[in-house]
Image (cartoon, grey):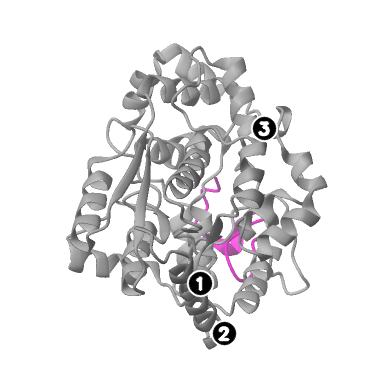
Amino acid sequence: MILNQDITSAGVKVCSRCIYDERVNGISFDANGVCNYCHQVDELKDEYGTGLDKGNKEIQSIVREIKAAGKGKKYDCIIGVSGGTDSSYMVYLAKEWGLRPLAVHYDNTWNSAIATQNIRKVLSALDVDLYTHVVDNKEVDDIFRSFFLAGVAEIEASTDLALAETMYRAASKYGVKYVLEGHSFITEGITPVGRNYFDGKYIKEIHKRFGKRKMITYPLMTFSRFIWWSTVARIRKIRPFWYINYNKEDARSFLEQQFGWQYYGGHHLENRMTAYYHSVYMPQKFGADLRNNTLSALARNGRLSREDAWKTYNTEPLIEEELVSYFQKRLGLNDELYEQMMKAPPKSWYEFPTYKKRFERLRPLFAVLAKANLVPMSFYLKYCFPSKV
C-alpha cells in the first residue's frame, strides 16, 4: 500500500480516470493515461446498454423468459444471498418484477450476526423461501487453514465457488433454469485476476497438500460439474445490474428504510472470513488493498473525486475488534505460526495446479456460453485469456 495520500505525488503511475495504478495485474494505459479496465467497463456498458433503454428492454425480455420457463413451478429463479447490499436488493427487485425467487445461501459458518439478521429481515418481509447449505465448520476451517499455510492470497475463495455450486444444486433440485446474481461491473468493476483466482482444481490441490480432513460436506465444483451445469443442465446466469441503472448507495438506503436492514461497515465485511481477507490478510501480507475496486468504480462514475478516492484508499482498512484472534483461534494457529506465515514470502495461484490453461484452450466454447448467459461474462473475460503474471 502507498501511504502518501497525494495522488499527484504517488510515486507510481495512476489511471487518469480511476485509481488503479501500475501495480494492478495486467494493467495498461492509453495515450491519455486511462487504464484498460476503464475501457473494459465502457465496452461492457455499450454491449449491455447499462441504464439505457437498450438495457432495460433486454432485462425485461429476460424476465419474460424466466416467467415462461418457470410456469407451473414453485420457483422460477435462484438468487444467492449473503446479507449484503447487492444480494438483498436483488431479491427485492426480483419480487418487484413479479418473479418467484428461491433465495440460496452457502453458510461457511463465519457469518456475522448482522448478515444473518439481514437475510431474515428481507426474506421474511418479501415472503421468499430460503435454501441453505451449511458446511461442517471443522471441514471448512481446514480448507481455510490449508490456504493460509500455502501462503496464497485466495484464502476465502472456496466460499465463492461453493456458493456457485450450491446455487446450481438448488436450481437442479427445483427444476429452475435461471440464477440471478447481484453483481454490478459499474459499482465493482471486474476484479483483475492477479491474486484473485479460484477454481475447483486449485481448491482441491491446496487442500490435499496442506489440509488434514476429508472434503465431505464442502460442495466442490469440479471442471466436469461446471461443464455439466453450463452445457447439459443449461442453467443460465443472469446479472440484472449489468443492464439497469443500479446505485449501491441508494439501494442500501432503501433497504435500511424498507426492511430495517443494517449496514455492516464496509464492502464485503458481512462475513468474518471475508472481512479478515480484505482488512488484514491482503493488506498486511500482500501489500494489496482490494478497496481500490469499489473506490475506482466510484471515481469512474463521478460519485467520488479521484483525489478523495485515493485518500480513502490510503487510510487504514477497518478491522473488527478481535478479528485476528478469532481467525487464529478458529484455525488453530498459535502466535508463532501465525506470524511466521504472515512474514513468509507470498505464493501465487499459478504455482499450483489449476484449470486455467484448460479454460484458455476452450475460450471459443466459453465465448459462446458467455453470450448465451450460460457462464458469467466476467468469468470469460478473466479466466479464458492468458494472464500477465
Question: Mark 1 vs mark 2: which is more N-terminal?
Answer: 2
- Crowd around label 3: few <14 · some 14–19 · many ≥20 (10 Å): some
Q: Residue furthest front?
A: 72
Dot in front, 1 or 2: 1
Residues at marks 3 and 1, CA–CA distance in whole angstroms: 42 Å
- Side of 3 relative to 320 (left or right): right
What amino acid type is highlighted by mark number 1?
Glu
Q: Which mark is residue 65?
A: 1
In the image, the segment drawn in magenta is: 1-22
Residue drawn 59% across the image and 29% down it: 203
Q: Secondary structure at mark 2?
A: helix
Image quadrant occupied by the C terminus: top right
* For discs 3 and 2, the disc positioned in front in the rendered view: 2
The reply to whether residue 95 is in sight is yes
The amino acid beneath tag 3 is: Ser
Residue placed under numbered mark 2 in the picture = 54
Disc 3: which residue: 348
Callout 2 amino acid: Lys
